[in-house]
Image: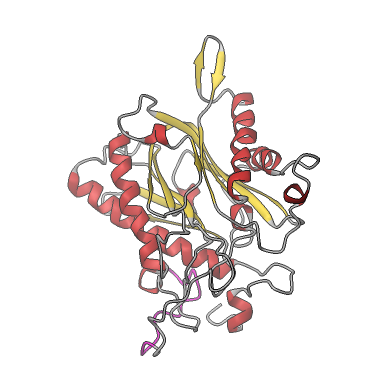
Amino acid sequence: MRNLLTDVPGVLVGNAQDARAATGVTVAIFEQSVSASVATLGGAPGSRAVSLLEPDMTRAVIDAVVLSGGSLYGLDAAGGVSAVLCAQKKGATFGGITLPVAVQAILFDLMNGGEKDWLVHPVEKRPPYWDLGRDAALAAAADFALGTAGAGYGATTVSAKGGLGSTSARTSQGFTVGALVAVNAVGSALIGDGPHFWAAPYEQGGEFGGLGWPARLPADALSIRFKGQPAPATATTIGLVVTDATLTKAECKRLAIMANDGLGKALRPVHAPNDGDTIFAASTGGAGPGGEPPVLTELGTVAADCVARAVARGVYEATSLPYKTAVPDWKTRFGGAGA
């Protein structure tokens, strides 16, 4: 087990980033089309083709999930991913035409200090996201970078640099569950102003420092810290969970809802008006049916734990951007405590 989403058989992940623009794209590509659904609990989401993931919609399967910076400009990334999928003959065929489905969610990283030329010269300059989507898809592999990488490249939280995190686990039934999260939260992953993570009770093997919770909660532990005071907020945490249990689209919907609660275990506040918190859920199948209520309950609980761990791991692994106003990373703030 790599402690990555790709521990689930049949899924690969690729990253691409533009250091000058301080933004990036992450894509999860499925070797075979998979059942999937989504749960969006934030108040300001941005997405592509997610309505077809509702259980009452006709299309039953997808081929990739795209996570991107760039806010609405980042939605171009799915086009680049789709081009690669088409070249790989993934997706359904209609009248000889290959039609892959790459669903997408975006986060807002447009005010992180990077050079976004397309905002200044919107006709002359083209956003980089189509190319980043293509490059991320071409880079898809079992191993991939965390922290300041892909969709997490330009991500931040209110108190520390955000980033890309991933984790995995196995259920008592032997199913594998993996999570992949780009952490750009409006709130904080940390307890008060210290190094401890809200997700500490779920940590496995010191994956984000091994500090646990503080012996005594600090007086400011429940003080509410969030972006947008007084500067405009740039937020949204997006991700996906995947399992090798065989699930229908409706069962994936329940899995996505339960997994999204993992954000509530790792971030405070969460699902706010300027968040777009979106979690996809997919089933690669092959390890047996997982839709019976007791089995699906455990899958959802483990998925939520994996999401919480991935949030903390994304922050723990991140490194700051090279700008004077950049949010410091966790290891710089706390001297690598627990590293």
Query: Whole-percent x and y of residue 163?
Result: 57, 62
**Residue at image point 64% right, 79% down:** 332
The quarter of the picture where the C terminus appears is bottom right
Query: Whole-percent x and y of residue 231?
Result: 59, 70
Residue range highlighted in magenta: 204-217
**Residue at image point 32% right, 56% down:** 302
Query: Whole-percent x and y of residue 221?
Result: 40, 83
Q: Residue furthest right?
A: 124
Whether residue 175 is visible here, answered yes or no, is no
Name the dominant secondary structure of the magenta segment: loop
Against 293, residue 32 (above or below) is: above
Of 170 and 136, nearer the camera is 136
Does 131 sit left or right of 295 as displayed? right
Q: Residue furthest top?
A: 95
Of 287 and 238, nearer the camera is 238
Query: Whole-percent x and y of residue 212?
Result: 41, 79
Q: Is residue 264 magenta?
A: no
Q: Quadrant of residue 291?
A: top left
Of 285 and 46, nearer the camera is 46
